[in-house]
Structure formats: structure tokens, C-alpha cells
Amino acid sequence: MEDAGEVRAVSGEALTSAKLVVQEAPLQFVKRLEPLSVEEGQIAELSVEVSRLGAKSRWTRNSAALTLTNRLRVDVQGMRHSLIINPVCLSDRGVYACEVTNDRTQARLTIEPRCVLLVSGLKPTTVREGGAATFRVELSHSDVDGKWSKDAVQLYPGNTCQLDKTGKVHSLTLSNLQPKDVGIVAFQAEGVRSSSRLSVEELPAGFTSPLEDVDTADRSPVTFTCEVSRESAEVKWFKDGVEIRPSHRWQVIVQGRKRGLQIMRCELTDAGGYRCSAGENETTATLVVHARDVLVLKPIEDQEVMEEGSAIFTCEFSHDDINAQWFRNDKRLRSGRNIKTRQTGKRFTLTLDNVQKRDAGEVKIVADSTSSSSAKLVVKEPPVHIVKRMRDKISIEGHRVILECQLSRATTEVHWFHEEAEITA
């Protein structure tokens, strides 16, 4: 602009002049608005740069002029003009525009809903009766309010319930806990939820009546009983140091202060040391199991069958409630397509179908690992016959000739003859 004015040219006495008028360059944006995406609750800053200092800008949202507040303000630093929203709300989203005298720019502001994440969740907690338990969660944001609950009932501060919040960490402390206080503790805030189980261990109970040793026969029912000092006492049962879980064979009895363990049908392997534990107290006993005398009333008999035929072995014992296993050449047999086992009362039957030469040998049945019976299986090969006979061939001298036939069994040894003389390789 300082170049405006009169410009003259002089040569001797000759002179000429003209006026130079400099027009101010139009005001425009050097840096225009760009689309911006911000999380709810954060700071959004929309910025432009104009071509000269001292320019005045006007801001709009969705074509409506903006009213400046403490949350929404305009900042001008030299040629940089900024619209600052702190903090942004979901309602702030839209198309923002900045206008100067000769130019206009616009961009969309997208507000993403705040996503509060669980950094560290609740963990299962177990305390002794009368003790205190503290639960903690850590969130990704600090300005979050949450709610605590136990078994879906909201908790409030009280003599035995303390709620605390320090930055991103929320904590709950429950004191003077009793067995009835067991349940699910949960924390919930802005779509985040975490839960865990609170367990309260009762103070150890004692035994007023201990276990006693038991001596019984195999396959008989057995019951161990003892008595605890209070009805609410929880006990665990162990055999040789391994905890026993209730099943179809093992039943746990709880009747008032009486505690029992019943073996519906004991086996030789059930013999050993048994223990009932109530916290730090315990009582023990020993189970002795005597084997039964299982007798073979009718032993299995030798069988001689043709190859691909069937062999049936039958054995009869003195008891029907036994564990019988079949073996062939000392290898245990399991039911399958060609192996079938059946029990009818005290009689046990093994059927071998489609037997082969390799199946020959000793067949044995063992009952309860104490009684057995064995027999021989002999497998004979069936006679060989020709399935497909040779056909006459006509050949040219010097050429190869193939004569072939098909037999009923692949393993048969074959001799070839020409006229009466045997052909050797």
C-alpha cells in the first residue's frame, strides 16, 4: 500500500507523470477448516488462518450464529483464529463455518459418545467370618460416577459399607462380614459392568463324634459317619489325600450336625484312609475291603472254526455283579464290528465274527482280577477253488503272453505248469 502515489519520468526539460493506485488484496483464508472428530467430554478446537492481521471473523453452526459462553469461546493469535469448545457435548455436533469479508470455509464436527473402558475389574474375594473385604475397579476415565450393588441391591455408605473414589479407581469396603453376606458384588457405570463373588468362611467347627474304621467285603455298601459342633459347618471328604466329589458312587450326607459319606458299592480300590475336614479340624478312619471268592461254574471251551466264520465262547461264574474282561493272546478285547460281548445273569458270552488266521490263539476271561478261564481258538483255512479260469490265448511268436486266473484266497501258494512240466521263475 505504501507504493501508491505519483510516478514521474524526467529527461532534460521533458517531464511526464502518472498516478499509481494500489488496491488492498482481498482478505481470504490461508488455512481452511478441516473435519474434526472428538470424544464427548474432551476439548474441540476448530482453527483457520487468514491472509492478514486484524481481520474479523464470524463463526456459525448449521448456518446459525454462535453465542459465545464460558464453554464456547473464540481465540485469535495473530492470523490464527480458533473456535474452542470445552468440554464438547453430543449436541455440539454439526457443520461449523468461519466467515471473513471476502471468504468462507466450513467443516463438520463429529462428536463420538464417550467410551468408558474397564481397565481392571473385580476379583473373587474370600474372607473369614467377622472380617472385611475390599473390592476395587479402575476405569479409563476419572470423571465417572458409578453404583455398587450386592445381589442386584444397590449399596449405600453405612457402618459396614464404605464407598470411595480416587481418580480412576472406585472401591467398596464391606466389614464385619457373616456367612449370610455371601453373594455377587457388582459395579456399574456408563455401560461398564464388573462383578465377582464374595465368599465368607465360617470359623472352624469341631467334631463331637469322630469317624470309625470299617471292614467290609467287596461290592458292599459302606457309610462313614461323624458329628460336628454346629449344623452350619461345611465339611470336605478325602481319600488318601484326594478330595472326594459326590457322584453316583459317592453320596454325601448332611442331617443336622451329622455328616456322612456313603459308598454305594465299594470296590477293592476303595480301600485306604478317609478323612473328614471342617476347616482346621479333621477326623480320620480306615476302610478295609476283602475280595470276594468268585468261582468259575462253567469254563470256556476250545473252539475250532473256519476262516471268516464265527467263534462263540461262554463262561459262567458264581456271581453276576462282577467286572469281567475278555482277552485274546493277552490283549484286551473291546466290543466292535467283529467283537461282541454280552452278559446274561451270571453267564458271559464273547462272539468273534469274520475270524482270520491271525486271530488264532488263547482266549481268556478274567473276573474281578481274581478268577479266570481260558481256551484255545483254532482257525482253519477254507479249501481253495478257482473263481475265474484261464482263457485260451493266440499270440505271435516273439511277443509277450499273459495268462491269468483268479482264486478264492489271495494267500494261496500257486504252481504253474507247461504241459506236464512245472514252470519255475
Image (cartoon, rainbow, N blue to C red):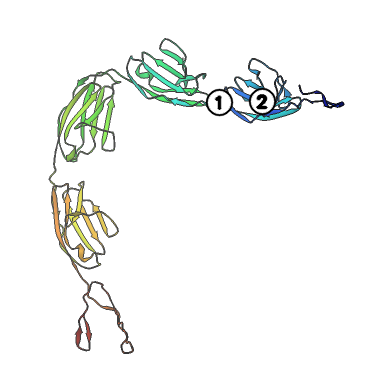
The residue that label 1 is drawn on is 114
Q: Where's residue 143, x and y in %?
A: 52, 18
Establish if 383 lies above or below 18: below
Q: Is residue 352 above or below residue 175?
A: below
Give the side of residue 62 with respect to residue 149, left or right. right
Is residue 151 visible in the rendered image? The answer is no
| Among numbered discs 1 and 2, the one appearing first in the sequence | 2
Question: Percent from the top left, x then y, of residue 82?
Answer: 65, 22
Residue 207, percent from left and from top = 21, 20
Q: Indicate the quadrant containing the N terminus: top left, top right, bottom left or bottom right.
A: top right
**Residue occupying image coordinates x 59% and y 22%:** 43
- Label 2 Cα neighbours within 10 Å, binned few <14 / some 14-19 / many ≥20: some
> What percent of the width, then of the height, locates residue 365?
17, 54
Give the residue displayed 26% in from the left and 38% down from the top. 249
Question: Relative to the observer, which residue lies in front, 367 or 11?
Answer: 11
1 vs 2, front mark: 2
Amino acid type of the residue tagged 1 in the rendering? Arg
Helix, strand or loop at label 1? It is: loop
Question: How much space separates mark 1 and mark 2, taking CA atoms?
Answer: 30 Å
Tag 1–tag 2 contact (CB < 8 Å): no
**Looking at the rendering, in which quadrant would you find the C terminus?**
bottom left
Q: Quadrant of residue 8?
A: top right
The residue tagged 2 is: 49
